[in-house]
Structure formats: structure tokens, C-alpha cells
Amino acid sequence: MPDGTPLLRVEHLRKVYASGRGEVEAIGDLSFTMDPGELLCVVGPSGCGKTTLLKCLAGLLRPTSGLVEMEGSPVTGPSPAMAVVFQEYGRSLYPWLTVRGNVELPLRHKKLSRAERARLVADALDAVGLPQSARSHPWQLSGGMQQRVAIARAIAYQPDVLIMDEPFAAVDAQTRADLEDLVRELHLTRGISTVFVTHDIDESVYLGQRVLVLSNSPTRVQEDLVIDLPAERDQLTTRALPRFTELRTHVYEQIQRAKRGPVVPSSRAHRP
Amino acid sequence: MTAVGATKARPRDLGVRVAENLLFAVGLPVLAVGLWAVWSTRSTSRFLVGPGTLLDAFRQTWIGPAFVEDVLPSVYRLLIGLFASILLGVAAGVVIGRLRPLREMLEPLLEFFRAIPPPVLIPVAMLLLGITDTMKVVVITSGAIWPILLNTIEGVRSTDSVMLETARSFRISRWDRLWLLILPAASPRIMTGVRQALSVALILMVISEMFASSAGLGYRIAYFQRNYLIAEMWSGILLLGLIGVFLAVAFGVVERRVLRWYHGMKEITRA
């Protein structure tokens, strides 16, 4: 792969759902790229097609037109290079399997030795801080711990991109802060490229190296914003930085504008 | 020390609780048998017998060669019929439940077949298959399969969409998807179907032996009835009840193992 090839390239993506009352345009015209090792947050008003975008990225939905490219080749279906963490952890983990069984599940069809598989599972559970819960069942754990299991399952799969769909929308505020730090830590220590979809502006600014603000439906890129906060982030000090406040205010304004109506999308890497 | 006193008191409380439970469990049956015994000494009816007579008849009729000649073959056919129903019902249920066009096409037809009382098929089955073990097993299966099939279809159909999407996004193989997602997800419904099938199968076991048969529990009971062997007839009915209870207990043990996750999860969400 030549240097500078983006990991993920989305070009003129458009998705129209056919429904009983006619056609619904979920995504109008989306284009962006993502470099290897990036942590990209996608934020937008509710109902703007974030989940549709994510499913197109993950190969779970076929776009109506346009292109999703992963490492130079088009995405036509679920790819072994991607792992998804869903919002509904309770419905994404299998309650009849133990935590270990759940994390191991996607590895079963990879051609790995038993020892290698066990190592990946143990390593992933270590990484999310749940080494002692391997033999529990998911429903015996708290919501935050269950979402950690889902994250462990995704990283044990060793994807090139981790795709997270509002993963922390259903947990309480403190658990959420811990999980945000976990995502930051996994990104810093393991360099996992991550697309993080959220409706929470603060979360997107705190987590991301870049924030993609989506417009209201039919969805376009409203703004592509570089988050120039230090790489070492901390729930207290980072959120107290004047720059953090500026950035979140800016994203907030953009979303308010996005709600009012479509505008001409601004160029990549814009700085307020 | 109060703590020690408390722990000492606990075993006695437990003993009292067990005794209480036992009293509630066997109290009514013991009372009923007692009343029955008193009543039977005064009754002059030829068709009703007392517990002593019944127990004697039970011992003489069923403990001995009749057990091997009549009871075991019946139970054997019952179990074969049940296993065939489970195997066919679950296999067909998974296929029909997964394929929506097939399901929509078949549903009215399945409802119709389920509505036919299986005993009316016995004469037809006799003509087609002869008076054989196969005929009896087919009759048992033809009735017991419906609750299993329809419950499996429903269970497979309602597999959670996020769980399916998870399997798809991780490219989980067809085989793993069947054994680790679809069947476990449908297992509570499948077990409900099997529970209903147990009683249907027992009824059909008896009925399939009452027509033109020369052995089996159902045949024996019909024989005793026709020959005015009243106590023996009642002892056969008692044996049927015992077989039913035994089946239900065995099923309960299996169900608790298979659905441990399900009961555990329900307990937690209820708490």
C-alpha cells in the first residue's frame, strides 16, 4: 500500500430507503476519508442517519450509490477488517454464552490454534479490565461491564477499524466517563483506528482527534473539524481547558445550524 | 454472642421449613387416599375399588413379565415418537422460521394440520403401515410434532435482530450461527413446545394401542375393561399417571440444565 492511502474512503455515499409511503433519503451525499490510526468521531443531530452511515461502513447495508472503500478495495459486505460495537450491548452479547464464549465467538472461524485463540481472548479481557469475569454470563454483569465485554470481543477480532455506534448511550454518566477513557486508552496504547458515532457533543470533542459534524437529513458533512487538544486527555483537566469549551461551543453551533437546514459543506480540516 | 445464636437457630428453621413444605406437598394426597380407603369400605359399586385392592392388583399385574411385554415396548415407542417429533419439529421449524416466504406460505396449512385430532389418523395409518410398531410411532409423532414445530418456528422467527446483525458483522459461520445463536435463542420456546408434546405423546401412545393391537399398556387397559377386571384396569391407569409424572420430572431436569441462562437472566431482571 503506498504511503498516504487512506484507511477508509467514503465518496458520494447516498442511501435511500424505500418505504410504504415513498422513498426516504437517509444519507444525501457524504464524502470523507480516514487515515490509519485515527480516532474519528461522527456527531450529528438525532435522526440524521448516523446509524445508516455506520452500517454502510460496516458492510451491513448496501449504499444506494457512491462508494465505501477500505484499504483501497470497495466494501461489499461485512469484512474481517472491521469490528462493530453496537449500542444495545444487552442484545448484542449472547446470554447463553459466558463472557469468554462471547469474546471467542468471532474467532472460531479464524484459523487459529487453540492456544492463540485463548491468548487473544485473555488479552482482550485484560485490555478492558475484566480478566476475572471470563466465566460469568453477560447478564450477571453491570451495563458498563457488558459494554466492556462487547469492546473486548471487537478487539480480540483484531480489526483494522473499530466501529462504535453510540456505544455508551445506555449507561450512566460515571460509567460512561470510564468507558470513554477506555476508548482513549485503547487508541493510544494499541493504535486501533476507531470510528465513534455519537449524538453527544462533549463526548465527540473529548474523544476524537477529528470530529465529523453531519447535517440534518438528507445528510451531508456539515463540517470536518480537527480537535487540537493534547493526546493525553483526562476527564477533569481536559474538559476544563478553554480550548475544549471553544471546540464544543463550535460543534454545538454547527449542529444547531445543521438542524436549521442544509448548507454548503465546508472543506476538510477546517479550524474555527 | 448473638451471631452464633443466629447461626445456631438457622438449621432448626430450615428443618421446620422442610417439614412444612413436605406437609404441604404430601398432606393433601395422604388425606385423599385416607378418605378413599374409608369410603371404599362402605361402597358397593363394582366399578370402584379401594386403595388396598388397587395396590394388590398393581403388584400382581405389572411387576413381572407384563412389565417387559407390555410396559417397556409402550414406553419405548413413546420415547422414539417423542425424539422423532423433537428432531423433525426442530429441524423443520428452523428452516421454516428462517425463510419468511416459506413461512407465510405454510402457516395456514400448518394450522390446519395441527387442528386435525391425530387419533382419527389411526385407521388410515393402519391401512398404510399395517398394525406395526412403525404405525404407532408415526401416530405418536404426528400428534406430538405440532407444538414443537410451531413453537420452534415462532422462536426462530423472533431471534433478536441485533444478535443476528452481530453475527453477520463478525462473519460468524452458518454452522456456528445455527448452534450458537438460532437454536439457543429459540430454546425457551422449543422447550415450551416439548413440554406440551409430552402429554400429547402419552395420550397417543395409549390410543394407538387400543385399536387392533395385541400388546402394550393401552391394549392391556382396554382388555381389562372389556373383561370386567376392574382393579387391574385401575392399576393400569395408575401406571399411566406414574409414567406421566416421571416424564415431567425428567423433562424438568433437562430443562433446568438447558435453560439455566434463561432462568438466571429472568431472575435478575425481575429482581
Image (tube, coloured by chain):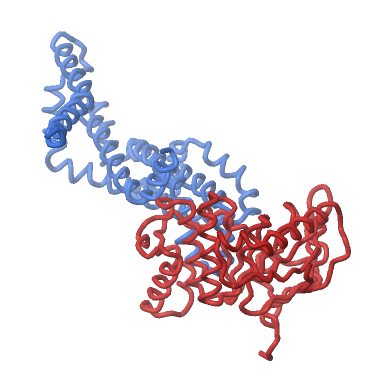
Chain colours: A red, B blue
| Side of B14 relative to A128 (left or right) | left
Residue A168, how many percent across, how many down? 57, 56
Q: Is residue A37 above or below residue B79?
A: below
| Side of B223 relative to B65 (left or right) | right
Residue at 15%, 22% (x, y): give it.
Answer: B51
Which one is in front, B41 or B134? B41
| Side of A251 relative to A203 (left or right) | right
User: Can I make out residue B256 in this image?
Assistant: yes
| Side of B121 relative to A205 (left or right) | left
Q: Is residue A118 above or below residue B116?
A: below
Residue B54, how many percent across, how many down? 16, 25
Residue B173, how many percent across, how many down? 52, 69
Residue at 38%, 73% (x, y): give it.
Answer: A118
- Mark count: 0
* Quadrant of the rendered image containing residue B53: top left
- Residue placed farthest to the right in the image? A264
Which one is in front, B109 or A120? A120
For the N terminus of chain B, give its image quadrant.
top left
Residue B238, how many percent across, how many down? 23, 30
Q: Is residue B53 above or below residue A111?
A: above
For the C terminus of chain B, give its image quadrant.
top left
* Quadrant of the rendered image containing residue B67: top left
- Residue placed farthest to the bottom in the image? A2
Which one is in front, A42 or A241? A241
User: Can I make out residue B139 in this image?
Assistant: no
